Image: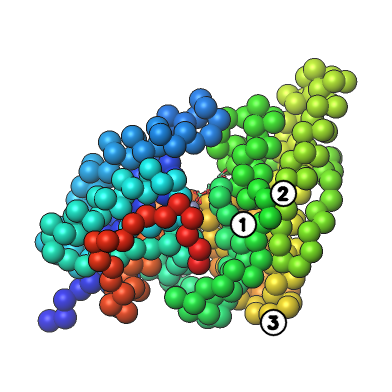
Amino acid sequence: MIKRIVILGIESSCDDTSAAIISDGYILSNIVANQKVHQKYGGVVPELASRAHQQNIIPVVDMAIGEAGIRKEELSAICFTQGPGLLGSLLVGSSFAKSFALGMNIPLIAVNHMQGHIMAHFIKEVDNKNRHPKFPFLCLTVSGGHTQIVLVKSVEDMTVIGQTLDDAAGEAFDKSAKILGLPYPGGPLIDKYGKLGDKHKFTFGKHQVGELDFSYSGIKTSILRVVEKGVEENPNFIEENRDDLCASIQHTIIDILIKKIMKASKETGIKEIAIAGGVSANSYLRARLLELKEKYNKEVYIPKFEYCTDNAAMIAISGYYKFLDKNFYNQSITPKSRLYL
Ligand code: KG4
Ligand code: ZN
Protein backbone atom coordinates (compact mmCIF):
# COMPACT_ATOMS: atom_id res chain seq x y z
CA MET A 1 0.00 0.00 0.00
CA ILE A 2 1.31 3.48 -0.89
CA LYS A 3 1.69 5.62 2.21
CA ARG A 4 -0.16 8.93 2.01
CA ILE A 5 1.77 12.18 2.41
CA VAL A 6 0.45 14.08 5.41
CA ILE A 7 1.73 17.63 5.94
CA LEU A 8 1.31 19.92 8.93
CA GLY A 9 1.54 23.59 7.96
CA ILE A 10 2.11 26.41 10.43
CA GLU A 11 1.55 30.11 9.68
CA SER A 12 2.44 32.88 12.14
CA SER A 13 3.78 35.75 10.02
CA CYS A 14 1.50 38.51 11.30
CA ASP A 15 -1.49 38.46 13.64
CA ASP A 16 -3.15 35.12 12.83
CA THR A 17 -1.96 31.86 14.37
CA SER A 18 -2.87 29.04 12.03
CA ALA A 19 -2.24 25.30 11.59
CA ALA A 20 -3.52 23.03 8.82
CA ILE A 21 -3.26 19.43 7.69
CA ILE A 22 -3.05 18.50 4.00
CA SER A 23 -3.06 14.87 2.91
CA ASP A 24 -1.94 14.08 -0.66
CA GLY A 25 -2.89 17.67 -1.58
CA TYR A 26 -6.37 17.43 -0.01
CA ILE A 27 -7.32 19.68 2.89
CA LEU A 28 -8.22 17.90 6.14
CA SER A 29 -8.23 20.86 8.53
CA ASN A 30 -7.37 24.57 8.61
CA ILE A 31 -7.58 26.29 12.00
CA VAL A 32 -7.08 30.05 12.29
CA ALA A 33 -6.95 31.94 15.60
CA ASN A 34 -7.38 35.69 15.03
CA GLN A 35 -5.91 38.11 17.52
CA LYS A 36 -8.49 40.65 18.65
CA VAL A 37 -5.97 42.37 20.94
CA HIS A 38 -4.78 44.73 18.14
CA GLN A 39 -8.15 46.29 17.31
CA LYS A 40 -8.01 49.08 19.84
CA TYR A 41 -4.54 50.16 18.65
CA GLY A 42 -5.58 50.64 15.00
CA GLY A 43 -2.91 48.24 13.71
CA VAL A 44 -0.88 45.18 14.62
CA VAL A 45 1.36 45.65 17.70
CA PRO A 46 4.31 43.28 17.06
CA GLU A 47 5.10 42.54 20.70
CA LEU A 48 1.46 41.66 21.45
CA ALA A 49 1.29 39.52 18.31
CA SER A 50 4.28 37.39 19.39
CA ARG A 51 2.80 36.85 22.85
CA ALA A 52 -0.57 35.82 21.43
CA HIS A 53 1.12 33.39 18.99
CA GLN A 54 2.95 31.86 21.96
CA GLN A 55 -0.38 31.28 23.72
CA ASN A 56 -2.23 30.04 20.64
CA ILE A 57 0.25 27.83 18.87
CA ILE A 58 -0.14 24.58 20.83
CA PRO A 59 -3.96 24.61 21.04
CA VAL A 60 -4.21 25.55 17.34
CA VAL A 61 -1.88 22.72 16.21
CA ASP A 62 -3.69 20.31 18.52
CA MET A 63 -7.05 21.30 17.01
CA ALA A 64 -5.74 20.96 13.45
CA ILE A 65 -4.50 17.42 14.14
CA GLY A 66 -7.73 16.52 15.98
CA GLU A 67 -10.04 17.90 13.30
CA ALA A 68 -8.08 16.14 10.56
CA GLY A 69 -8.67 12.86 12.38
CA ILE A 70 -5.02 11.82 12.18
CA ARG A 71 -2.41 10.80 14.76
CA LYS A 72 0.73 12.94 14.94
CA GLU A 73 2.77 9.81 14.14
CA GLU A 74 1.20 9.86 10.66
CA LEU A 75 2.78 13.23 9.79
CA SER A 76 5.24 13.05 6.87
CA ALA A 77 6.69 16.55 7.36
CA ILE A 78 6.19 19.87 9.13
CA CYS A 79 6.34 23.13 7.26
CA PHE A 80 6.24 26.70 8.46
CA THR A 81 6.29 30.28 7.18
CA GLN A 82 9.89 31.47 7.04
CA GLY A 83 8.97 35.05 6.03
CA PRO A 84 8.27 37.76 5.10
CA GLY A 85 6.53 38.99 8.24
CA LEU A 86 7.06 40.23 11.77
CA LEU A 87 10.20 38.62 13.14
CA GLY A 88 8.85 37.96 16.64
CA SER A 89 5.75 36.33 15.19
CA LEU A 90 7.74 34.24 12.72
CA LEU A 91 10.06 33.08 15.50
CA VAL A 92 7.18 31.50 17.42
CA GLY A 93 5.98 29.43 14.43
CA SER A 94 9.46 28.50 13.23
CA SER A 95 10.77 27.51 16.69
CA PHE A 96 7.69 25.38 17.25
CA ALA A 97 7.97 23.71 13.83
CA LYS A 98 11.70 23.03 14.26
CA SER A 99 11.25 21.45 17.70
CA PHE A 100 8.25 19.38 16.58
CA ALA A 101 10.05 18.08 13.47
CA LEU A 102 13.12 17.26 15.55
CA GLY A 103 11.04 15.49 18.18
CA MET A 104 9.10 13.48 15.58
CA ASN A 105 12.23 12.87 13.49
CA ILE A 106 10.52 13.96 10.25
CA PRO A 107 11.54 16.49 7.56
CA LEU A 108 11.27 20.23 8.13
CA ILE A 109 10.18 22.52 5.27
CA ALA A 110 10.35 26.34 5.10
CA VAL A 111 7.83 28.23 2.95
CA ASN A 112 7.76 31.80 1.65
CA HIS A 113 4.49 33.40 2.78
CA MET A 114 3.90 35.05 -0.62
CA GLN A 115 4.48 31.76 -2.43
CA GLY A 116 1.94 30.30 0.01
CA HIS A 117 -0.72 32.87 -0.97
CA ILE A 118 -0.24 31.94 -4.65
CA MET A 119 -0.20 28.19 -3.93
CA ALA A 120 -3.58 28.49 -2.17
CA HIS A 121 -5.04 27.92 -5.65
CA PHE A 122 -3.77 24.33 -5.57
CA ILE A 123 -5.46 23.24 -2.32
CA LYS A 124 -7.72 20.32 -3.22
CA GLU A 125 -11.06 19.56 -1.63
CA VAL A 126 -13.11 16.38 -1.81
CA ASP A 127 -16.33 16.91 -3.81
CA ASN A 128 -14.97 20.01 -5.47
CA LYS A 129 -13.98 20.61 -9.10
CA ASN A 130 -10.53 21.72 -7.91
CA ARG A 131 -10.01 24.04 -10.85
CA HIS A 132 -6.59 25.68 -10.66
CA PRO A 133 -4.56 28.00 -12.91
CA LYS A 134 -2.40 26.47 -15.62
CA PHE A 135 1.28 27.44 -15.88
CA PRO A 136 2.36 30.01 -16.84
CA PHE A 137 -0.12 32.32 -15.14
CA LEU A 138 -0.19 35.84 -13.71
CA CYS A 139 -1.01 36.27 -10.05
CA LEU A 140 -2.08 39.57 -8.56
CA THR A 141 -0.93 39.19 -4.96
CA VAL A 142 -2.57 41.81 -2.80
CA SER A 143 -2.32 41.79 0.99
CA GLY A 144 -1.71 44.11 3.91
CA GLY A 145 2.04 44.07 3.25
CA HIS A 146 2.32 43.38 -0.50
CA THR A 147 0.98 44.37 -3.87
CA GLN A 148 2.65 42.46 -6.65
CA ILE A 149 2.06 41.04 -10.08
CA VAL A 150 3.84 37.69 -10.17
CA LEU A 151 4.65 35.70 -13.29
CA VAL A 152 4.25 32.08 -12.13
CA LYS A 153 5.99 29.61 -14.44
CA SER A 154 5.97 26.69 -12.00
CA VAL A 155 5.64 25.95 -8.28
CA GLU A 156 9.22 27.08 -7.71
CA ASP A 157 9.61 29.61 -10.51
CA MET A 158 7.86 32.83 -9.54
CA THR A 159 9.05 36.28 -10.70
CA VAL A 160 7.72 39.62 -9.53
CA ILE A 161 7.11 41.74 -12.66
CA GLY A 162 5.38 44.69 -10.96
CA GLN A 163 4.98 45.92 -7.40
CA THR A 164 4.02 48.82 -5.19
CA LEU A 165 6.59 51.54 -4.68
CA ASP A 166 5.05 52.58 -1.34
CA ASP A 167 1.86 51.36 0.40
CA ALA A 168 0.31 47.98 -0.31
CA ALA A 169 -3.33 47.81 -1.47
CA GLY A 170 -4.46 46.33 1.89
CA GLU A 171 -2.58 49.09 3.67
CA ALA A 172 -4.36 51.66 1.48
CA PHE A 173 -7.70 50.11 2.49
CA ASP A 174 -6.77 50.07 6.19
CA LYS A 175 -5.32 53.61 6.24
CA SER A 176 -8.35 55.02 4.38
CA ALA A 177 -10.65 53.27 6.85
CA LYS A 178 -8.69 54.86 9.68
CA ILE A 179 -9.26 58.31 8.12
CA LEU A 180 -13.00 57.52 8.22
CA GLY A 181 -12.67 56.50 11.89
CA LEU A 182 -13.28 52.80 11.19
CA PRO A 183 -11.51 50.15 13.32
CA TYR A 184 -8.58 47.99 12.17
CA PRO A 185 -8.51 46.12 9.84
CA GLY A 186 -10.70 48.47 7.85
CA GLY A 187 -10.53 46.65 4.47
CA PRO A 188 -13.52 44.35 5.14
CA LEU A 189 -15.56 47.31 6.46
CA ILE A 190 -14.89 49.44 3.38
CA ASP A 191 -16.04 46.42 1.35
CA LYS A 192 -19.21 46.12 3.47
CA TYR A 193 -20.24 49.80 3.36
CA GLY A 194 -18.98 50.25 -0.20
CA LYS A 195 -21.66 47.84 -1.42
CA LEU A 196 -24.28 50.41 -0.34
CA GLY A 197 -22.70 53.52 -1.85
CA ASP A 198 -22.11 55.38 -5.14
CA LYS A 199 -18.58 54.66 -6.40
CA HIS A 200 -18.48 57.78 -8.58
CA LYS A 201 -19.50 60.27 -5.87
CA PHE A 202 -15.91 61.18 -4.96
CA THR A 203 -12.69 61.10 -6.99
CA PHE A 204 -9.25 60.84 -5.45
CA GLY A 205 -6.04 61.96 -7.17
CA LYS A 206 -4.50 60.27 -10.18
CA HIS A 207 -2.36 57.15 -10.25
CA GLN A 208 0.74 58.12 -12.16
CA VAL A 209 3.19 55.26 -11.83
CA GLY A 210 4.33 53.72 -15.10
CA GLU A 211 4.92 50.17 -16.27
CA LEU A 212 3.50 47.46 -14.01
CA ASP A 213 4.26 49.18 -10.69
CA PHE A 214 1.80 50.69 -8.23
CA SER A 215 1.69 53.63 -5.83
CA TYR A 216 -0.97 54.27 -3.22
CA SER A 217 0.50 56.99 -1.01
CA GLY A 218 -0.74 59.87 -3.21
CA ILE A 219 -4.26 58.48 -3.22
CA LYS A 220 -4.21 58.19 0.57
CA THR A 221 -3.23 61.88 0.84
CA SER A 222 -5.97 62.82 -1.61
CA ILE A 223 -8.57 60.90 0.47
CA LEU A 224 -7.36 62.69 3.60
CA ARG A 225 -7.75 66.10 1.88
CA VAL A 226 -11.28 65.35 0.63
CA VAL A 227 -12.34 64.16 4.09
CA GLU A 228 -10.70 67.09 5.93
CA LYS A 229 -12.31 69.61 3.58
CA GLY A 230 -15.69 67.88 3.90
CA VAL A 231 -15.54 67.87 7.71
CA GLU A 232 -14.55 71.55 7.71
CA GLU A 233 -17.73 72.40 5.83
CA ASN A 234 -19.97 69.89 7.60
CA PRO A 235 -18.99 68.21 10.89
CA ASN A 236 -21.23 65.24 10.01
CA PHE A 237 -19.62 64.80 6.58
CA ILE A 238 -18.21 61.33 7.31
CA GLU A 239 -21.39 59.89 8.85
CA GLU A 240 -23.60 61.32 6.10
CA ASN A 241 -21.33 60.11 3.27
CA ARG A 242 -19.88 56.92 4.77
CA ASP A 243 -21.20 54.52 2.11
CA ASP A 244 -20.35 56.76 -0.86
CA LEU A 245 -16.87 57.43 0.55
CA CYS A 246 -16.25 53.70 1.02
CA ALA A 247 -17.56 52.86 -2.47
CA SER A 248 -15.40 55.58 -4.06
CA ILE A 249 -12.27 54.63 -2.10
CA GLN A 250 -12.74 50.98 -3.00
CA HIS A 251 -13.32 51.78 -6.66
CA THR A 252 -10.14 53.91 -6.77
CA ILE A 253 -7.92 51.25 -5.16
CA ILE A 254 -9.32 48.32 -7.17
CA ASP A 255 -9.44 50.12 -10.52
CA ILE A 256 -5.66 50.52 -10.40
CA LEU A 257 -5.22 46.79 -9.71
CA ILE A 258 -7.47 45.84 -12.64
CA LYS A 259 -5.76 48.22 -15.09
CA LYS A 260 -2.30 46.91 -14.16
CA ILE A 261 -3.20 43.23 -14.37
CA MET A 262 -4.78 43.88 -17.79
CA LYS A 263 -1.58 45.63 -18.89
CA ALA A 264 0.50 42.68 -17.64
CA SER A 265 -1.73 40.25 -19.49
CA LYS A 266 -1.38 42.25 -22.71
CA GLU A 267 2.40 42.56 -22.39
CA THR A 268 3.04 38.89 -21.57
CA GLY A 269 0.27 37.43 -23.72
CA ILE A 270 -0.84 35.35 -20.71
CA LYS A 271 -4.59 34.99 -20.32
CA GLU A 272 -4.59 32.92 -17.11
CA ILE A 273 -5.12 35.39 -14.26
CA ALA A 274 -5.23 34.54 -10.56
CA ILE A 275 -5.54 36.64 -7.41
CA ALA A 276 -4.14 35.94 -3.96
CA GLY A 277 -3.71 37.58 -0.55
CA GLY A 278 -6.11 39.18 1.93
CA VAL A 279 -7.45 41.85 -0.44
CA SER A 280 -8.63 39.12 -2.83
CA ALA A 281 -11.46 38.62 -0.31
CA ASN A 282 -12.82 41.99 -1.55
CA SER A 283 -16.19 41.53 -3.25
CA TYR A 284 -15.76 44.44 -5.68
CA LEU A 285 -12.36 43.10 -6.85
CA ARG A 286 -13.93 39.67 -7.34
CA ALA A 287 -16.77 41.17 -9.37
CA ARG A 288 -14.39 43.23 -11.52
CA LEU A 289 -12.27 40.14 -12.22
CA LEU A 290 -15.30 38.15 -13.30
CA GLU A 291 -16.05 41.00 -15.69
CA LEU A 292 -12.61 40.44 -17.28
CA LYS A 293 -13.57 36.84 -17.85
CA GLU A 294 -16.85 37.81 -19.52
CA LYS A 295 -15.66 40.82 -21.51
CA TYR A 296 -12.07 40.01 -22.38
CA ASN A 297 -12.03 36.23 -22.49
CA LYS A 298 -9.49 35.84 -19.66
CA GLU A 299 -9.36 32.73 -17.48
CA VAL A 300 -9.82 34.03 -13.95
CA TYR A 301 -9.07 32.15 -10.72
CA ILE A 302 -10.33 33.39 -7.36
CA PRO A 303 -9.48 31.39 -4.23
CA LYS A 304 -12.13 30.33 -1.75
CA PHE A 305 -12.74 33.06 0.79
CA GLU A 306 -10.99 31.26 3.69
CA TYR A 307 -7.82 30.78 1.62
CA CYS A 308 -7.52 34.49 0.75
CA THR A 309 -6.49 35.92 4.12
CA ASP A 310 -3.61 34.43 6.10
CA ASN A 311 -4.02 30.70 6.75
CA ALA A 312 -1.84 27.63 7.20
CA ALA A 313 -3.51 25.57 4.46
CA MET A 314 -1.63 27.65 1.88
CA ILE A 315 1.64 26.92 3.72
CA ALA A 316 0.84 23.20 3.97
CA ILE A 317 0.07 22.90 0.23
CA SER A 318 3.34 24.67 -0.64
CA GLY A 319 5.10 22.27 1.74
CA TYR A 320 3.42 19.33 0.03
CA TYR A 321 4.94 20.27 -3.34
CA LYS A 322 8.34 20.85 -1.73
CA PHE A 323 8.02 17.43 -0.10
CA LEU A 324 7.42 15.82 -3.52
CA ASP A 325 10.68 17.50 -4.66
CA LYS A 326 12.45 16.38 -1.44
CA ASN A 327 13.17 20.03 -0.80
CA PHE A 328 13.95 19.70 2.92
CA TYR A 329 15.63 22.14 5.32
CA ASN A 330 17.92 21.54 8.25
CA GLN A 331 17.67 22.89 11.79
CA SER A 332 19.93 25.87 11.04
CA ILE A 333 17.14 27.57 9.04
CA THR A 334 16.03 30.91 10.52
CA PRO A 335 12.99 33.12 9.87
CA LYS A 336 13.47 36.28 7.82
CA SER A 337 11.32 39.40 8.13
CA ARG A 338 12.26 40.25 4.54
CA LEU A 339 12.14 37.37 2.12
CA TYR A 340 11.70 37.67 -1.62
CA LEU A 341 10.14 35.35 -4.16
O1 KG4 B 1 -2.99 38.43 3.43
P1 KG4 B 1 -3.49 39.08 4.67
O2 KG4 B 1 -4.50 38.32 5.52
O3 KG4 B 1 -2.32 39.47 5.63
C1 KG4 B 1 -1.10 39.96 5.13
O4 KG4 B 1 -0.24 39.12 4.77
O5 KG4 B 1 -1.01 41.20 5.03
O6 KG4 B 1 -4.12 40.49 4.23
C2 KG4 B 1 -4.68 41.37 5.17
C3 KG4 B 1 -5.17 42.60 4.42
C4 KG4 B 1 -5.62 43.72 5.35
O7 KG4 B 1 -5.06 44.93 4.89
C5 KG4 B 1 -7.14 43.73 5.20
O8 KG4 B 1 -7.74 44.98 5.39
C6 KG4 B 1 -7.29 43.27 3.76
O9 KG4 B 1 -6.31 42.26 3.60
N1 KG4 B 1 -8.63 42.71 3.50
C7 KG4 B 1 -9.53 43.32 2.71
C8 KG4 B 1 -10.70 42.52 2.76
N2 KG4 B 1 -10.46 41.45 3.59
C9 KG4 B 1 -9.18 41.59 4.04
N3 KG4 B 1 -9.44 44.44 1.98
C10 KG4 B 1 -10.53 44.79 1.27
N4 KG4 B 1 -11.69 44.08 1.25
C11 KG4 B 1 -11.82 42.95 1.98
N5 KG4 B 1 -12.97 42.27 1.95
ZN1 ZN C 1 -0.61 37.29 3.87
Residue ID for mark 2:
216
Residue ID for mark 3:
269
Tell me the amino acid under the disc marked 2. Tyr
As displayed, is residue 83 above or below residue 193? below
User: Residue 119, how many percent across, how many down?
Assistant: 45, 67
Residue beneath the point at 63% across and 50% down: 168
- Determine which quarter of the picture holds residue 122: bottom left
Q: Label 2: how many residues lie within 10 Å, few (<14), some (14-19) or many (20+)?
A: many
Residue ID for mark 1:
147
Q: Earlier in the sequence, mark 2 or mark 1?
A: 1
Disc 1 element:
strand
User: Residue 114, how many percent across, how many down?
Assistant: 49, 61
Tell me the amino acid under the disc marked 3. Gly
> Do the CB atoms of the residues marked 2 and 3 lie less than 8 Å apart?
no
**Inter-mark Cα distance, 2 to 3:** 27 Å
Q: Earlier in the sequence, mark 1 or mark 3?
A: 1
**Inter-mark Cα distance, 1 to 3:** 21 Å
Residue 68 visible in the picture: no
Q: Going by the picture, which residue comes out furthest to the right?
A: 233
